[in-house]
């Protein structure tokens, strides 16, 4: 079972919820930090990241000495990443999707495969032995999804050896990386705040993600304000509200000391456990029974 | 020499289009004869690389200068490599008026991008001078 914890905007406490869930999860679980532009789930889980693998993408490099300027590579590129504005093509790496099409098309062998560094795929364990995967995007790299796919490859290999549920901390927002993160989730848990801004961003994220055909549900974090707006929207959109997690002084203090939500107190831990149960129940395909 | 102007239509009487890669029209003007020929904008609806395709079209047409509103960072790099002088911030007037100012030597080339381009976060920038910069690409 794959659960993605997402949010329309940053600062809703999405990572806190994801980390708390990972700690109280009733079954073996792997935590995945897909917020590759600012990974920090490992810190929340107190994990030690022991493996760090550089992830690269094959991109073409042009050898001007062999190039005749025929433009065949440019015509082969569906992404307009090669421009013929001089005697040899000019590559725009930020547009290149590493499809390799141009390499096959060059008649003179002027295109050779080069590697673009995307960032690192990180693997580690929590003090209790739970597996944690993460990606760290290279500063300056414009696209997160290719690195996220590399993290997914490492994750799949690990799951094949030792099956477990997957709990994804998705990047905030409603753009390509957020969609990539929730793509194969059995359930997307949208964490929101009961404020007009929270509702606005929840609406955007829901709108962007509903096309993926994933089951979705909502967790109201920092409850305590009037959450009628969020609840009305969820009712209209058919989104179950699985929990309302209060934010009080104890929570704030625990965070300040680097504690997770389940460590704040038994009530908070209980709420998280109930949430984990609700999630597993909802994400279990009908016909199967949740073996909690 | 030949130069290119982005326009909202197909004649010199149409206004300068503030966008480059996604301009409504392109005119190639022969500055010695004054003749203006419309050129199809190659990739106005492309998901990405519209500005690069437009830069290529200019190279093919033999243009040595571009009069427009704003170019984005990738198009700016391509135009620079092609040796095409870029004149930006010319929206809000007819193509003819911009051309006359160019012929009078009243314009200064500026090859640095004015449009923000398509940032990773999806932000679409406003060019200085108030021009709305479209998707660069
Ligand atoms: S690898 Fe694919 S996307 Fe990249 S330049 Fe070549 S054809 Fe274009
Ligand atoms: S296909 Fe090869 S020879 Fe032709 S322009 Fe591209 S790199 Fe040069």
Image (cartoon, coloured by chain):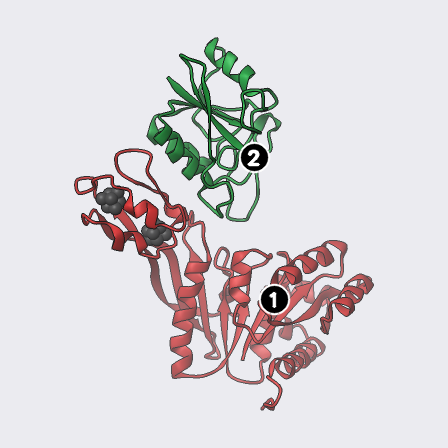
Chain colours: A red, B green
Check disc 2 and report the residue beneath it. Answer: B133
Where A66 sits versus A221, above or below? Answer: above
Number of disc labels: 2
Q: Quadrant of the N terminus of chain A?
A: bottom right
What SS does tag 2 mark? loop
Residue B40 coordinates in the image, percent (x, y): 46, 34
What SS does tag 1 mark? helix
Is residue B123 in view?
yes
- Observer-nearest residue: B84 or B26? B26
Residue at 60% x, 20% y: name it: B93
Left of A126 or right of it: where is B130?
Answer: right
Q: Which chain carries label 2?
A: B
Residue at 34% x, 47% y: name it: A75
Dots 2, 1 in contact, CB < 8 A:
no
Is residue A247 in view?
no
Q: Mark 1 lies on which chain?
A: A
Q: Which mark is residue A16?
A: 1
- Observer-nearest residue: A46 or B18? B18
Where B70 sits versus A58, above or below? Answer: above
């Amino acid at each position: 079972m794959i659960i993605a914890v997402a949010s329309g905007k940053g600062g809703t406490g999405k990572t806190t919820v994801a980390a708390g869930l990972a700690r109280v999860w009733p079954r073996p679980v792997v935590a995945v930090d897909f917020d590759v532009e600012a990974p920090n789930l490992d810190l929340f889980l107190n994990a030690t990241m022991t493996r760090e693998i550089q992830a690269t993408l094959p991109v073409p490099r042009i050898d001007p000495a062999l190039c005749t300027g025929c433009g065949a590579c440019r015509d082969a590129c569906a992404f307009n990443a090669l421009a013929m504005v001089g005697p040899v093509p000019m590559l725009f790496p930020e547009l290149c999707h590493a499809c390799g099409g141009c390499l096959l098309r060059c008649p003179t062998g002027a295109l050779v495969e080069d590697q673009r560094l995307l960032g690192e795929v990180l693997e580690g364990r929590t003090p209790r032995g739970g597996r944690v995967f993460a990606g760290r995007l290279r500063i300056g790299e414009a696209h997160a999804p290719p690195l996220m796919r590399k993290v997914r490859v490492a994750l799949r290999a690990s799951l094949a050896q030792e099956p477990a549920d997957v709990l994804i901390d998705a990047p905030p927002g409603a753009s390509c990386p957020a969609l990539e993160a929730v793509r194969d989730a059995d359930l997307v848990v949208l964490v929101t705040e009961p404020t007009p801004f929270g509702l606005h961003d929840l609406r955007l994220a829901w709108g962007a993600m509903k096309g993926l055909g994933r089951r979705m549900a909502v967790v109201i974090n920092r409850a305590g304000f009037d959450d009628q707006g969020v609840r009305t929207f969820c009712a209209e959109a058919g989104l179950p509200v699985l929990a309302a997690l209060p934010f009080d002084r104890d929570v704030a203090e625990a965070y300040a000391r680097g504690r997770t939500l389940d460590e704040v107190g038994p009530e908070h831990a209980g709420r998280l456990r109930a949430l984990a149960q609700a999630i597993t129940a909802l994400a279990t395909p009908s016909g199967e029974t949740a073996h909690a | 020499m030949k130069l290119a102007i982005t326009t909202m239509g197909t004649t010199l009487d149409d206004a300068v289009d503030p966008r480059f890669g996604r301009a409504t029209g392109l005119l190639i003007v022969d500055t010695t004869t004054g003749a203006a020929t419309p050129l199809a904008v190659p990739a106005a609806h492309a998901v990405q690389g519209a500005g690069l395709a437009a830069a290529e079209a200019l190279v093919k047409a033999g243009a040595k200068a571009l009069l427009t509103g704003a170019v984005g960072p990738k198009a700016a790099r391509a135009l620079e490599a092609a040796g095409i002088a870029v004149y930006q911030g010319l929206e809000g007037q007819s193509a003819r008026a911009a051309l006359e100012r160019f012929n009078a030597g009243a314009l200064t080339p500026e090859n640095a991008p004015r449009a923000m381009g398509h940032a990773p976060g999806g932000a679409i920038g406003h060019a200085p001078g108030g021009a709305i910069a479209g998707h660069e690409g």
